[in-house]
Image (cartoon, rainbow, N blue to C red):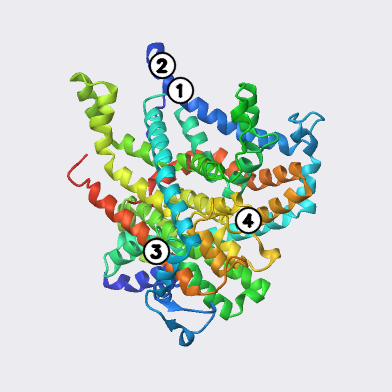
Amino acid sequence: MKRNKGMIILFLTPAVFMFSVIFLYPIIRTVIMSFFKIDGITDPVARWQFTGLANFVKLANTSLFRISMWNLLRIWLFGGIIVMSLALLFAVIITSGIRFKSFFRAVIYLPNIVSAVALATMWLQYVYSPKFGLLKTMFTKLGLTDLAKIQWLDNDHKFAALLLAYCFGMVGYHMLIFASGIERISSDYFEAATLDGANKFNQFRYITLPLLKGVFKTNITMWSVTSVGFFVWSQLFSTVTADTQTITPMVYMYMQIFGAGNSITERNSGLGAAIGVLLSVCVVTVFWICNHLLKDDDLEF
Amino acid sequence: MAREKKYREPVNWKRELRLAPGYLILLLWITFTFVLLGWVLLASFSTTKEIFSNKLLASGLHFENYVKAWINSDVAGIFRNSLIYSIISCSLLIIICAPAAYVLARFIFPGNKLIQTGFVSAMGVPVVMIVLPLFGIVASMGILNNVMSNAVLLIFLYIGINVPYTTIFLMTFFSNLSRAFEEAAAIDGCPPTKTFWLIMLPMAQPGIITVTIFNFINIWNEYFISLIFANSDKLRPIAVGLYSMINSMKYTGDWAGMFAAVVIVFLPTFILYIFLSEKIIAGVTGGGVKG
């Protein structure tokens, strides 16, 4: 290995350098920043004022931020339940031996490759349009005039509309992960269970689900990571800068640091950093809970 | 996943009937997807008046929507920007990540596991954790005031945020390649560096293609980083440009033009997907994603 030392260093340096500049250093600095009051984002460290946990306390006392966290929780929980159930259902169907499997799979995954801005625009300007929208046309044709009259983008329905559109785009990705997990399960188990007289539902309940624990963990972690970064959809669905129905912590942070929103009175980059730290803590907590609840090391397959 | 059945089974109607509910659910879902995309496509060829009266294409195909969007709203500009960003970033990503991935996959040395753990964790780091310090550094260095340095910065950032994923993906790929090739090359007296560039890198081509498609789609659709760091209208990539275009088109009432712009943005990734969907799907589950 000695004579390869030069090669190892040469080959690793560019990637490790990029990693340190883009991830390592900024992460450490963000954590430190969250404990300081920083008037301008370009201020040198000498002008930072140490305030301890004041930034976090302030966030907890800001009603707009609390609303944004509440929205994030709703997106994560309700969206998660919708996306995971649909993704699992589709994954089970896809792997059940149907025809045109690749075609179905490809179409369900398709929304994931579309720019979120384009996809959100399609939903906003077409599906939910009060004049020529898909939902309106469909409900009118079906004679459900009450449903056709719903203004999907008013304040009462906006959050549901946002969530539905977002979930539509996310199902494909999680379906693929579930499907690959199901395909890894040896068919011997199912054959043995069929011989013993277990029906399809029981096979799913007692073979597929327990063996998918690890896959669930992956899916929930990935879902949490993407939820925390919820930004584009919220920006597209909001008509005013601080829309209480759609605001998320990322949007709040953006307004606070980069935007010229009129709802922001005080500029403090430390607050933005504190939001980042809070969101990371959320992801790590979810990951930790998943690891403890869904231990899969006792199952070998 | 790669082991698809090559032969066609004869249609077993009893079996298909049992699967009917499954077919029905999937058909409903994909019908909706097709209606959504199809309607937008048709609307992009209609006039705004036709869109509002729900009579798409009543007066034939209106290609002028595309001409208007491409030239008047300067979709051409943001399209070119994104194309340049994506192509440069994707190529540099391979040059940076493939050697690192190879070394991580093949050699045992102190820090190997640490680097891997770092890269895997970085894939789960919310972008809010990194933008503030980066913006601080960049702004105080005056990089955002010059168009050229700002463009270089954007490419640097696109590369940086995709380094962990690309490296880990290629690492899994390299560790699945047989060591026999390197051993043979070593016996013939080929130095390890040369072995990598001439033998191992070409052999990793399928993995490189898959990860590059992913990087291309990611960078093409990237929004948040560009929104913050692209300081000039001239530098805006497609997602950010589309966003401001949609906002202005809502006020000018040019719905047809807006849908044309949406289709233009959507088209490159869609065409890639039509030809390479199997590769892309295999890539989602193949490497990179770890719990």
Which residue shows up at 42% across the image and 20% down it?
B21
Q: Distance between the residues labelled 1 and 3?
A: 43 Å
Q: How far apart are marks 3 and 2 (CA)?
A: 50 Å
Q: Which of marks 2 and 4 is in front?
A: 4
| Subunit ID for the residue under disc 4 | A
**Observer able to see residue B168:** yes
> Which residue is denoted by mark 3 in the rendering?
A278
> Which residue is denoted by mark 1 in the rendering?
B23
| Subunit ID for the residue under disc 3 | A
Q: Is residue A149 left or right of residue B27?
A: right
Q: In this view, does B238 lie to the left or right of A233?
A: right
Circle 3 packing at 10 Å, graded few (<14), some (14-19), many (20+), is: some
Is mark 1 in CB contact (under 8 Å) with mark 4? no
Q: Position of residue B31 (x, y in %)?
A: 56, 28
Whether callout 2 and callout 1 share a subunit is answered: yes
Q: Distance between the residues labelled 2 and 4?
A: 51 Å
What's the residue type where badge 3 is placed?
Leu
> Which residue is denoted by mark 2 in the rendering?
B16
First-in-chain label (4 vs 3): 4
- For residue A288, the mark is none
Q: Nearer the viewer, mark 1 or mark 3?
A: 3
SS under mark 2: helix
SS under mark 4: loop
> Which residue is denoted by mark 4 in the rendering?
A240
Q: Position of residue B287 (x, y in %)?
A: 38, 49
**Observer able to see residue B1:** no
Task: Look at the picture and state if B279 lies above or below B78.
Answer: above
Task: Look at the picture and state if B107 lies above or below A125.
Answer: below
Q: Position of residue A139 (x, y in %)?
A: 61, 26
Report the front residue among B96 and A249: A249
Q: In this view, does A43 lie to the left or right of A228?
A: right
